[in-house]
Amino acid sequence: MKKILALFVVWMPFTLWAQHPSDIQEQSAHYASMGPHPDSFWDSVRVAEGAPSSTTNIPEMRGSCTLNKRVFGWHPYWVGTVYTNYQWNLLSDLCYFDYDVSPNTGNNVNASYNWLGSTAVTAAINNGVDVHICATLFSSHSTFLASSTAQATFINNIISDLQARGGKGVNIDFEGMGSSNSAPFTAFMQNLSTQLHAQIPGSELSMALYAVDWGNVFDIPNLTPYVDLFIIMGYDYYWSGSTTAGPDDPLYNYQTSYNYTLTRSITFYLNQGMPSNKLLLGLPYYGREWETVGSTIPSATTGNFSSSRTFSAIMNNANGYYNTPLYDPVSFTPYYSFLVGADWRQCFWENSYSMKRRFDVVNQRNLGGIGIWALGYDDGYTDYWDAISERFSNCAVVPCSDTLWDMGGPSRNYYDNEDYVTTIAPDGATQVTLTFSQFDVELNWDTLFIHDGPDATYPLIGAYTGTNSPGVVTSTGSSLSIHFQADGNTTRPGFTAVWSCTADNVPPVTTVNGPGGWITQDFNCSFIDNDPGGSGVAQSFYQAADYSGSEWRSNAANGFFNDDFDAGQIHSDWTVMTGVWNASNTVLEQTDEANSNTSIVAPLEQNLSDCYLYNWRGTISGTGNNRRAGFHFFCDSANLPNRGNGYFVWFRVDQSQLEIYEVINDVFSLRASFPMTVTAGQAYDWTVTYDRIAGKIAVYQDQNFVGSWIDATPKADGNYVSFRSGNSNWQVDDFRVFRSRATNGTVPVTVGSSAADFRYQTLGIINLAGIIRSMVRDSAGLLSVPNEQFFFVDWTAPEFFAAPIDGNSLDIDTTYTLTQIEGNWSSALDTNSGVVDYLYCIGTTPGDSDFVAWTSNGLSTAFAVPAMLVPGTWYYIGLRAVNGAGLVSLTDTSNGQVAELGLGMDEQIAAWTLYPNPAVDEVTITGPENAHIETVKIYDMDGKLVATYMIFGGPVIHIDVSDLAAGSYTLEITGSNFSALTPLIKQ
């Protein structure tokens, strides 16, 4: 059994087990001493203390990146109007500081408290950020916690204030408590939670945790069910009273004798059973400066000077001390070492890199997010906002290569009772490799498990303990997960591993999978999308285009555009506003090089899909030194110089730049720029995509990604597109606009009207009339080449211009040929797919087919068919034409013909006798004295021939009719010089 040691000897830079005053207390007391003042006063104080006097140099804010972690920032009343520069989309919670709790009454004793009138709180609410009140108590905790009256007053006040402004919750920051306060504090928090949640459904109770809980104040198991959010005050590990200068927030152990760090605090609180998603890591937006006995680190402090320094003051460097930062690779902290007169000073702080490393641990330990003390301390600079975007939002990109350490970092041991899972899934990766350069954990007690997939439920690659290093481990897919478990005693140096990945550099592919044959009506078109590079298809697009008879176009009202500029003139869709534009030699060209803002505009609906793709061939040339050209999209004006509201991309030849602009109220504002080679006179394939939901614009040159920008408030509607040039010649060809669709999905394609996707029909059987094109983009940002399918389109049936004719030439009304019927007609017209067949029928009423069913006649325009016509009966020809698309014309009907005997009916019957009639077995036929009968044919009442007798005799003959079914028949008696009909009834 493993032996557990219970003796700990630790050297502290301050009194053992004492909860020293924090920087928050120090700063709060400093500003409280100035009394209540308006924001303008606090703005002047900020400048006096080293903040920038102007923030006009702040780079453009991050766009609409969406947070995937909580970012909880405290807003002290003394930061003035800096909230105007908060990047609201990167802030989930603003906590107004502070309600200073009176321990005797529970009322607020902070005269500067202005929760109800705070414009910062208003701005946060207007930007969709949750707002909280921070309640502080820095002394006399036992007095407050012993007074139920003071607690009740405080709870009522807080709930009332939150209700007045729609606040989310209250944050409790009671600092300096000892172990004797533990039980009453827990009871107070439980009572506060119960009342808060009952009176404000959906509200949150949060609390600040000490970086090191020296007195075991917080009863985490009994607080966790009641507290919604815990925030470690991850600063003051080294403070104003420290005997050694060091980082406020060491990520890893700065010096071996004092081993309290951010990673240890995280492990400590998680080991008490707190859910990781309830725990936030508070981080300082300030540093601390000491007078020290020397220049090297670690160095003892003299006790003569110590002060906090905000990030903006350090960056502004008004005193000239913060010129060349040094770096402590053990604690991952930058610092400055410099002389003030003859005295050494050291200032520890966090730059963008070191802050992102702290954010990495938040992700590595799966915490709920971060806390910020304090918002506004970085005012004038966006380094930390950028870091938040790059680590905690949907804009974050996991690099293809980086280093992973245990919680001890690169130079120290890990901690007891660690238990966490970290997933490595670089963006665009198809395979991940971990290469271990160090591995040393306690044999058989501490273990690293490596799983082949995005979490610990995936197949186990191996379990490693002692010095049995995993060496090199490679995934089968795009991710690996490591699960590290350490027991409660004995630690070792741990592990260091570098991950690398096989990235996706193979473009995705797409195939249009529409129906074959002729298109005659609306149809569904499906697509097959695939990414052989392995990162997966991220977005899919399609375009519908149709052939007008002279050029391929698209229906702009349906969100598509197509112009190959092949018609020899500018299409009427376009309006030339400024410049000299012509369409010749199959390109659109602007030739006025003196003009700095040319414009050609076309309407295009751009609110029908989530994302749009604009693609064209473009060439910029000319003789000047400021040649540029570009494209407006999602704009709402055709007439204003900058197209009203929308977006624009400039391609600059002479500056080798891509520039992305936003246009608001016709004001042109640069949002992002990227280096890009644009050679004068060279044609490029340009692609721009815009996601109107996420606000992301991405630009490609010859299928290669150049740069992107995200709009925080993306425009949702666009009505026009426009090409533009400045002091250059600008040629444009093959302009196409695609809409987004579901990957491997199906889209409806409309056919047959001016509002349809396919508005035109095939002209002749060899001409195409419709195209569906497809493009896709994978998760690595690679674009496919377009795929397309052409379609023959015909929705118009053939048309007759004259009714069919009874007879074999001219129209007849009476036929005396009772054994055959004839008809003819003029050819039908079909200019699209052509006539391929004629169908005819014969009926005894117009439109009926009761005598001859519908029969194919090929392309022949006449017919003659044998038939037993019934004297006195009218016969009508029905006619239809079928085209190559399978469409059938309307039925045309002849005016009819009546069948008549050559002699009158009575004369025919009188010349011939049948006996017996009705007959049973045999009938005797007697004709005129000189009749020589050759053939007798018997027809049923449908005109069907049922029996034929070859006779060659007469004038009296006998016919066996015993096989005939009972019914009415007609006998046709023929000889060399006569033909006669007579009825017969068979019983």
Image: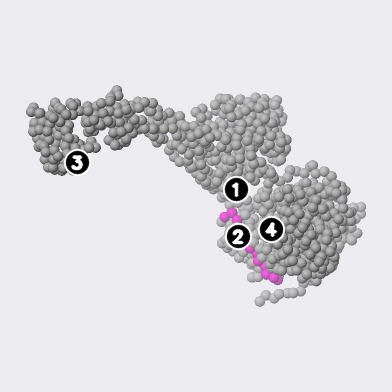
Residue 481 covered by magenta stretch:
yes
Magenta segment range? 477-489
Label 3 or label 4, whichever comes before in sequence order: 4
Drawn side of residue 528 relative to residue 215, left or right: left
The residue carrying mark 3 is 967
Separation of residues labelled 1 and 4 (CA atoms) = 36 Å
Query: Quadrant location of the C terminus?
Result: top left
Q: Secondary structure at mark 1?
A: loop
Mark drawn on residue 455: 2
Please name the amino acid that badge 2 sits on. Answer: Asp
Residue shown at the point (63%, 56%) measured from the top left: 424
Q: Are marks 2 and 4 in contact (CB under 8 Å)?
A: no
Vertical order, 134 against 187 (above or below): above
Mark drawn on residue 779: 1
Residue shown at the point (17%, 31%) measured from the top left: 981
Residue 261 covered by magenta stretch:
no
Q: Position of residue 355 (x, y in %)?
A: 74, 54
Q: Position of residue 127 (x, y in %)?
A: 72, 48
| Outermost front residue | 906
Vertical order, 342 against 796 (above or below): below
Q: Are marks 3 and 1 in contact (CB under 8 Å)?
A: no
Q: Nearer the viewer, mark 3 or mark 1?
A: 3
Q: Nearer the viewer, mark 3 or mark 2?
A: 3
